[in-house]
Amino acid sequence: MYSTLRYTLESNGTTYENDSINASLLVELITNLELQDYVVLEPSELVEGSMYMQAAALDEPGQMVAEIRLQEGESGFRHYSYTTADPTVIIQWILDYWGKQQLPQLESWKDITHELD
């Protein structure tokens, strides 16, 4: 289904192309996120309707956020956010997104689309 799918990973101004991305790099970048740090994983084509998935450190110590943007219609989108103190949850979601082209279950995520309009 995604035979031509490629990823671009951006983290704090550094861009990694598809062949440079692996599980170890993803785990390392997410594990070591500090304030103002981020990781954005963008597929070359939509994965289950999603345009990208990202993770970032928050102002509150130990808190991280994962976000995902889903295309809606021709030019619209829905944007979801999940805040946690457990980086392993975010690591697993990112690894599944990258390795299995699988989205997390978004029922417990917060729809923050209205905050981005």
Image (cartoon, rainbow, N blue to C red):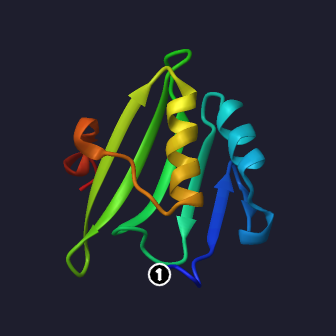
Along the line of sight, which residue is nearer the eye, 33 or 47? 47
In terms of image quadrants, where is residue 42? bottom right
Outermost residue, top side:
61
Identify which residue is drawn at 71% across, 50% down: 23
Quarter of the C terminus within the rendering? bottom left
Identify which residue is drawn at 65% across, 60% down: 9
Kindly tell me whether residue 113 is visible in this rendering. yes
Q: Is residue 68 above or below residue 108?
A: below
Identify which residue is drawn at 56% across, 28% down: 87
Along the line of sight, which residue is nearer the eye, 31 or 10? 31
Direction from residue 26 to residue 19 in the image, left or right = right
Along the line of sight, which residue is nearer the eye, 69 or 102? 102
Can you give x and y, in whole percent of width and height, for residue 41 in the image?
57, 58
Amino acid, disc 1 = Met
Residue designated by label 1? 1
Can you give x and y, in whole percent of width and height, for residue 91 in the image?
58, 39
Identify which residue is drawn at 57% across, 54% down: 40
Q: Is residue 99 above or below residue 25?
A: below
Q: Is residue 88 above or below residue 47?
A: above
- Secondary structure beneath dot 1 equals loop
Direction from residue 103 to residue 93 in the image, left or right = right
